[in-house]
Amino acid sequence: MNINPRQKGPRRTLFGAVALAASLSLALTGCGGGNADAEGGNNGESSEVGEPQAGGELTVLLDAGYSGGWATGLDPATSNTVGANLPQSNAIFGGLFNLEADENGENAEVVPHQAENYEFSEDGKTVTITLREGVTFSDGTPLDADAVVWNWIRALNSGSSGAPQLELAQDIEMPDLDQQFLDDLYAALPEDVDQAAVEQDLGAIQAVDDLTFEINFSTPNGAFINSLPATSLNFLASPTAYKEIGGEEFSRAPVGAGPFTVEANQLSERLDLKKNEEYFKDGLPYLDELSFQAVGGDQVLYQTLQAGQGDVIEGLSSVTLIKQAQDNPQLTTTLGAPTSPYVVQLNTRKPPFDDKKAREAIYYATDFETINDGLFNGQGDMTQSFTASGGLFHEPEVEGYREYDPEKAKELVEELGGLTVELGTTDIVTARQVTTALQTQWREAGIDVKIDAVPLGDVITKFTSGEWESMLQTAGAWEPAAGIGVGVRFGSTSPFSGTPLPEGADTASEALEKGLNTELDDLLMNAAATVDEQERADFYQQAAKLISDEAYGPFGPAFSPAQVMRKGVHGPGLTTPIPALAVNPGVLYDRVWVEQ
């Protein structure tokens, strides 16, 4: 079996269906508000706190249905849930790059962490990264360029469903490499790995010297650095430790260069970490011990925190519980910087939404402003496109966007001779509330609506089969080209899209095989490719206008879960917001501290 087979032509930017839908399921559980105030400002805590204090321990509660599930282990190369397990991975591995933001969540940018700097070539096809000198893994071995190459080749060729799919250059010859390096690399790959694919990747990803490496793409990739922190490529593990303890044990207790090391790991239950005394940043981490506990659902998460059996909830999504937490004087609540707006996706590939008039009727019949006020206390960040105020390239309004007009909706429904719609979503409380509100609004315009709220697995099946009409989902990420970004929802070959297929293709697979694109595909790929920020913004504005003009799906309030913690806990991503790379806001646990 070919673990990572090559398609004809360059690798396309595709997405792991299971990992992506898992992210989606959490994203649909609620819709948090706009930018938080200064630290703790959401429920009255003073923004003035003392100097960070060293010592103490912290237990972080994670939703078992998302970030609290790590059944395939924590080895970045073989885990299927790296995107969901960013809290654990950041704590153990640290990361080449981090997403940082001002204390109010604004001006977020990806900055070097274990890396020292990076540079794009003039044509945008090569990225050269220099590592920080003196960084070691917790076993004392160096985090150098060879270690990066070892990690990245494993990440691309170990069969993980969450592996990044990159358009790597295929015409660069593999350099002469030390035989021991190659032996150790192949020993860490599946026995039936595609050796030709590995050698091709070793040509595209090369060490330049001890602290410098480069990655070469077949086409420019301006979004690469911004996308990196949410992928397995950001998290580097010790090749020496892997060789010594073997793959199975390494997946349970991986060795990284992050602020903490693994003490005990009960898969998808509890992870106990202790301070890494060899961490490369002086005086950090502040905490002596850090634990992650999986808990089933928002209600139980909140009850567990109230019972004193945890200190922090990462990503509380229930609007009702967020309000309770904000009113609780014993807790601090921070609303994240919103990045992911709701969208009603319309499947243009089958009736009724192969008719543009039907799609226009949905736009005019949808009043997300009222839903935001009624269900989310007006805290949602309203937008007319796939961007939100916490993310890059935010443009809240789109010229010509069809706003709520029930009379126009009724006229269109009459012209159509009636309109019957199935509205699907994931079977979770908040999603059902939103779809029920939409059903009421659409019925007022004469649209007959059947709600189909089903478990996550059935949502995946619906999407991949193409047998769906409309879906309440989220579309967006801090970096539009990454995570559950615009390409997932509107790219013609994405399994989670209902936009038209390219001319000359009857299926997404055929479009990929023939290299066919739609106009929207070209805009999205051009936006991801260029390294010029203004060009990227222009392409995304054009894409938003095309989505609006063709009525591919109306947008609603942007999603952002809340971080909730007991008083006395502080740190970036907890008491000050950082935009979400995937679903939940990021947390920099090396700088988290507790009052003693």
Image: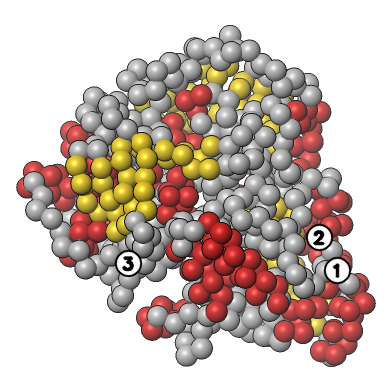
Q: Residue at x 77, y 78 (%)?
A: 360
Pick whichever, 426 or 541, lies toward us.
Answer: 541
Q: Nearer the viewer, mark 3 or mark 1?
A: 3
Amino acid type at image mark 3: Ser
Say whether disc 2 or disc 3 marks the residue closer to the N-terminus. Answer: 3
Say whether disc 3 or disc 1 marks the residue closer to the N-terminus. Answer: 3
Task: Say which quadrant the C terminus sits in.
Answer: top right
Q: Which residue is mark 1?
A: 404
Q: Which residue is mark 2?
A: 368
Left or right: 191 in relation to 298? left
Q: Residue at x 72, y 36 (%)?
A: 36
Neighbour class for label 1 at 10 Å: few (<14), some, many (≥20)?
A: some
x, y percentage for residue 47? 71, 22
Q: Cβ–Cβ below 8 Å for labels 1 and 2?
A: yes
Pick whichever, 26 or 409, lies toward us.
Answer: 409
Q: Which residue is mark 3?
A: 218
Q: Residue at x 66, y 43 (%)?
A: 337
Q: Secondary structure at mark 1?
A: loop
The answer to whether one can see residue 1 in this image is: no
C-alpha distance separating marks 2 and 3: 41 Å
